[in-house]
Image (cartoon, rainbow, N blue to C red):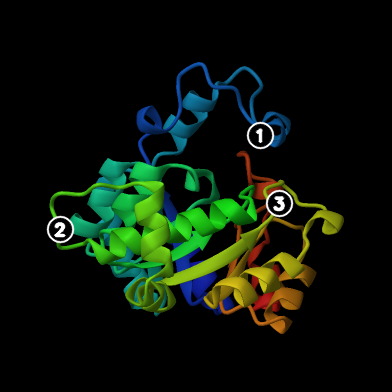
Amino acid sequence: AFKLIEAGAEAGSDAIKFQTFKAESLVTKSAAKAEYQKQTTDLNESQFAMLKRLELNWNIYPELISYCEQKGVEFLSTAFDQGSLDFLVHDLGLKTLKIPSGEMTNGPLLLAYARTGCDLIVSTGMATFAEVEQVLGLLAYGLLTIEESNLNPSFAAFQEAFHSVQGQKLLQEKVTLLHCTTEYPAPFEDINLNAMITMRNSFGLKIGYSDHSEGITVPIAAAALGAKFIEKHFTLDKALSGPDHQASLDPKELKEMI
């Protein structure tokens, strides 16, 4: 983790993003691995066992944040469950959070994210256009009700919040939408960067791109099209064991992309 922070900072990254989760709160013990994970990790290991092995001990987070500060980069993380979200916000004091694509239909967690009042970077892989609008309504509702204790969430309440003047103002202040193609690695023909433009034109929010393609061509194209935020996996060595190394940049490639 410390070596990755150092490499990312030397490459010119603005932020280094981690993932915060407890395996038992994320998957069942019988959950199968994704196909790309089966190709790059032990076939006999379960999804739960793999994630349990990859958990970062929470005790190390203050040191990681301190090291990011030393290196001049921002520490970011994604919370995959309520306990992890509470830890990032209340224990560590993070002001910006990334919502992963896989939680786009997890209403209770999305509402909890919104009610932190943090700036939110929202990845939209696998979501339909209608689902993105629903999520924005839910986030607007959460942002509007931060001070309230008795909530009555509903699709109607989300729609009302989304269409309200104050709801739109808060979304524009707080939310960045990331286009994302959920394939590892993502083939060029499946990227469809025009979806990013469609979201910007439709919702009037800051846009960005979360990339799973190989190489650095697509992030450069996304930046040329107006992406304000690029998220890219990187690794110290693509030959390391684990599910994502092969679809990641090495430090030299990361520097070239930036």
Query: If the image is split into quadrants, where does the C terminus sit?
Result: bottom right
Q: Which residue is mark 1?
A: 37
- The reply to whether discs 3 and 2 touch (Cβ–Cβ < 8 Å) is no
- The image shows residue 97, relative to residue 112, as above or below, that is below
**CA distance separating discs 3 and 2:** 43 Å
Task: Say which mark, if any, is on residue 148.
Answer: 2
Amino acid type, callout 1? Gln
Could you say which quadrant of the image residue 254 lies in? Answer: bottom right
- The image shows residue 254, relative to residue 241, as above or below, that is below
Q: Residue at x 37, y 71 (%)?
A: 164
Q: Which residue is mark 3?
A: 247
Q: Is residue 239 visible?
A: yes
User: Dot 2 lies on which element?
Assistant: loop
Residue 91 picture location, percent across and down: 18, 56
Q: Earlier in the sequence, mark 1 or mark 2?
A: 1
Amino acid type, callout 3? Ala
Could you say which quadrant of the image residue 209 lies in? Answer: bottom right
- The image shows residue 3, relative to residue 103, as above or below, that is below
Q: Nearer the viewer, mark 1 or mark 2?
A: 2
Residue 48 picture location, percent across and down: 48, 25
Q: Closer to the camera, 2 or 243?
A: 243
